[in-house]
Amino acid sequence: MDIKTQESEFVEIHPKISYLSVQELIAHRHTEFEPTSGGLKRTKNEGTAAEVEELKRAQEYLRAQLSVPRIERLGGRALAVWHEEQQVAEVKRKDGKFENFGYSEQGVLYLEYYEAMFLLEVGRLQLEYCGLVVSIEQAYVLLLGKLESERYTNYLVYSALSRSGYIVVKHAPPQEIPQEVTSADCIWALLKEKVENQPVPDHIKTSSFYPIAEKRMQDVKELITSQKADPNIVVDPIDLKFGEKKRMAVEKPIEEPPSKKEKFSTTGRSLVDQLKCEFSYAKFEEFFEKFDMVQLKSQDNTKDQLDTPSALKIIFDLHLHNKGFKKSAPKAPNFNVVILPTQAFPTHDQISKMKHQNLLTAPLLVISEVPTVWIMGGPGSGKGTQAQKIQEQYGFKHIDPIALVEMEVETKSPAGQKFQKSLSAGTAIPLQQIIPLIEKQLMSHRGVLKGFVIDGYPADLEEAEVLENGFGSPNLINAGFGSDNRKYTQFIQSRPTPKSINVHRKL
Amino acid sequence: MYLTLLNGTGFVFNVDDYMELRSKHRIMGAPVGTANTKGWSPNQSTLPVELSKFETQLLLDENIAKLVDKSKDLKAKPTAEKLEECKADFESRLLGQEEALKTEKLRETERYMDKILTGKRKKLLKQGKNDLAAALTDKDVLMEMSANFKFDRQNALLEVPCEHPTNHSAQIVTDPIVHTNSLKYRVFKDLWRRGKYVTSGDAFGADFLVYPGDPMIYHASHIVIVHEQPVIKPLELIAKVRLSVIVNKSCVFAYEMENNGEKIHYQTVAWCNPGK
């Protein structure tokens, strides 16, 4: 590009490139680019001839990768027209498999900006604006815009997930589906009517189970009031088998613990543990598992709060290829995708609010701007999900640097006296002062160091595993997405398919 | 060199421009375009290259490139006259391909001549025309192919260019896009001026990564953490240094002292283990 005019703020730009000649088009039509394995990187730049050669090759390779042209027959691509006002691309002609793209409105198929951009960049779409074929550069200006925008993040996420094999569609808000009334619902409704004087809702009354449940309840009520034994009901006698237990105790003498302390500890020898193998215990357990957990009405979400829109916005729905996705009759998605706008981390309240607003149709996939693994127990795991708390609890559990500093103060060393001043002033300790101290302390406490858990901070899968074991399987997924200089996306999927995808965008 | 203003920062659409930025000016950027290779490998990206705001600002400050806003011209509707001209040009480019595509077709025919000949002979033998089958030569096939070649506009090749290929106007962006006196930007600039390759430190939870050479063949040697205040909490120090040790890099804290002008200080922390 050459500079022509500089007098005003406007410049005339003459592109360095021009349209390819016919020969070039034919020659480069099938250019394929094979990624090389790369090999190990070096840690030191010693300026040797081998390094210069290696760098030259790497640069040639990069140039080749970046210069693969997008050439196709005129009739070989889909065709769409960009509407600037509506910010959609209207499809004029489809190509090949198109069922996962776009949405229909009054018989016309439209593409969202990210879909149009994706198809354009993978060479499947010829996009026209005002009757002319747009270049990639013009498409970026038209579809994504000059201002800093979430559209860029959305497009990168859409592109990365699509290429990873997911079907990514615009998030569809959940529809109110009338739930089928079960026999249990009828019984609950009846109970509420009798106990709490709540009228039975109409949709339950019309259920075929309702008269049966009502009849049964009436029968049971009569049984109880008339106190007549029903010959049909057989009550299993509970045999406590006292004799058997005694014999068992004789047959299997419990080993005496070596120490007195252990002898009195209850682990493995409690009365409760022994009773667990009893028939009656198993019977009660069986009954207990049949109980439904009835959730208490949440107090922290007033109606007003639920009506205000959530700060978190679900952008995409994710479907798996092998689940038979159909655009005309979509099933429930496998994931809802939230892309965090800034580095802000969603709080437990925000997540639970989303749940209460019934916005979710699937587990959440949270993609953040920074490649930090966000560890999130779902609502109901009962723990705050703020990253800092998790770090405190799982990352720095055994670390007590304050004690180290205090020890220095106690010994009244020169450094300690300085710390005393800082501590009493309530200020943080200056960097230069603390470095030699920490080094010294860490070295003299190497045994203690083993208890430190600062593993691969900030991204660590083990932490996630610890959490999963502790909190139960999270119904949220951890993901990282880098902005700035290195485009870096990482998804760690823990449910429902145990599969992990790594998407790195870096050179 | 012109950078296109997109997403509030500079984008590069020309491969020569980018290679110059990378090899001559040590500006890495990140290719964000989706590559049109088969198999849709998620690891492959291509032009355009998105520069970080710091990188863009640095190029502006050093007078290496200019940032331009192209949205006005590229969004504008062309005049009827210009539209006519562009369409005529487009058509002539398509129709001009007839000869070349014919030559290409004949070249392809020659390449697969053996197979074509055997197939044609077989067909003739089936029809009982043994004489014709024996007399069939390469030339006959080529003649036939040449006579039967019909140019279809739909088969003309079209490239979707990356960089906008026609002349257009753009507005120079004069305002800085980051606070040029912020400590983070000054640290970035200072490290770059010292001849280092500096990229974002997101992947390690830091501010910058410093490489001894092009990141394509070298590992980062330093993790740089910028501190607005020249103080650090012990816990934070351990966490940051410990991480850098694990990934075999040196941890550097960058900060400035109060009442000491705008001089940037660097503190490298080494982690030694005398037990080993």
Image (cartoon, rainbow, N blue to C red):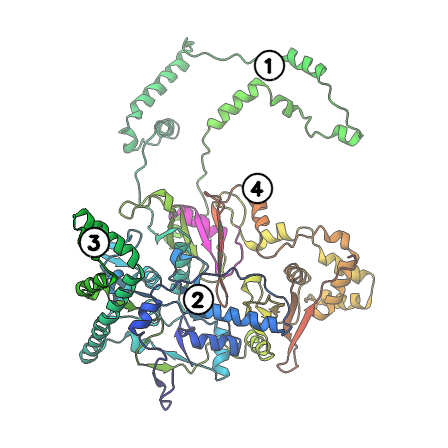
Q: Determine if marks 1 and 4 fall on one subunit.
A: yes
Label located before the other in sequence (4 or 2): 2
Q: CA distance from mark 3 to mark 2?
A: 48 Å
Does the CB distance between marks 2 and 1 fall below 8 Å?
no
**Residue B216, percent from left and from top:** 54, 67
Place residue A83 in its image quadrant.
bottom left
Against A411, residue B255 (above or below) is below
Label located before the other in sequence (2 or 1): 2
Chain letter behind tag 4: A
* Mark 3: few/some/many CA within 10 Å (<14, 14-19, 20+): some
Give the number of the disc on residue B25.
none
Residue range corresponding to the magenta coloring: A347-375
Does the CB distance between marks 3 and 1 fall below 8 Å?
no
Instruction: In the displayed orientation, state which residue is furthest to the bottom.
Output: A7
Q: CA distance from mark 4 to mark 3?
A: 77 Å
Quick check: A145 left or right of B18?
left
What residue would you read off at disc 3? B133
The structure residue drawn at horizontal position 65% and vertical position 53%, both measured from the top left corner, is: A396
Q: CA distance from mark 1 to mark 4?
A: 36 Å
**Residue B244, percent from left and from top:** 64, 62
Residue A142 seen from this side? no
Helix or strand or loop: what does disc 1 sit on?
loop
* Mark 1: few/some/many CA within 10 Å (<14, 14-19, 20+): few
What residue would you read off at disc 4? A469
Foreground mark, 3 or 1, reads: 3
